Image (cartoon, rainbow, N blue to C red):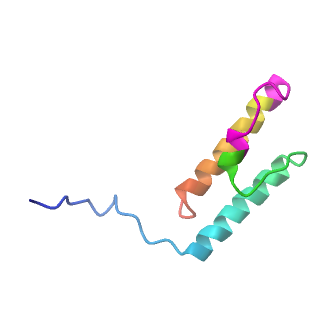
Amino acid sequence: MTALRVPKFVRRRPVDDHAMDDWASQVRSELALELPDEDIGEDLDDCLDFYRLGSKPRCEEIEYLALVRDARDRIDQGWTA
């Protein structure tokens, strides 16, 4: 059985947990500044999972969901992005 070789550019560097927590906190802080009237929790997936469609005017709803998804994706990509 042969081992799968992963090209060097695909490998992920080990991530410092403290630096990742700082990055996630920074992203959540930026999101809170963009959405000052919203109660943004620690887990952005929960914000998306528990959001009730139609609870805001359509244009605000689209903006809210896009901002939360973007912040979640930025955190998932990591602080090196």
The residue most toward the left is 1
Q: Residue at x 77, y 56 (%)?
A: 30
Front-lying residue, 46 or 38: 46
| 39 horizontally vs 17: left or right | right
The C terminus, quarter of image:
bottom right
Q: What stretch is highlighted in magenta?
A: 47-60
Find residue 25 and report its image quarter: bottom right
Q: Which of 43 and 76 is in front in this view?
A: 43
Residue 63 located left or right of residue 81: right
Q: Is residue 49 magenta?
A: yes
Q: Position of residue 33 (x, y in %)?
A: 84, 53
Query: Residue 58 occupies which quadrant of the picture?
Result: top right
Q: Nearer the viewer, residue 61 or 33?
A: 61
Number of numbered markers: 0
Task: Determine if the magenta segment contains residue 14.
Answer: no
Image quarter hosting the N terminus: bottom left
Q: Residue at x 78, y 59 (%)?
A: 29
Task: From the top left corner, tell me how far across and down residue 16 is, in percent.
Answer: 53, 75
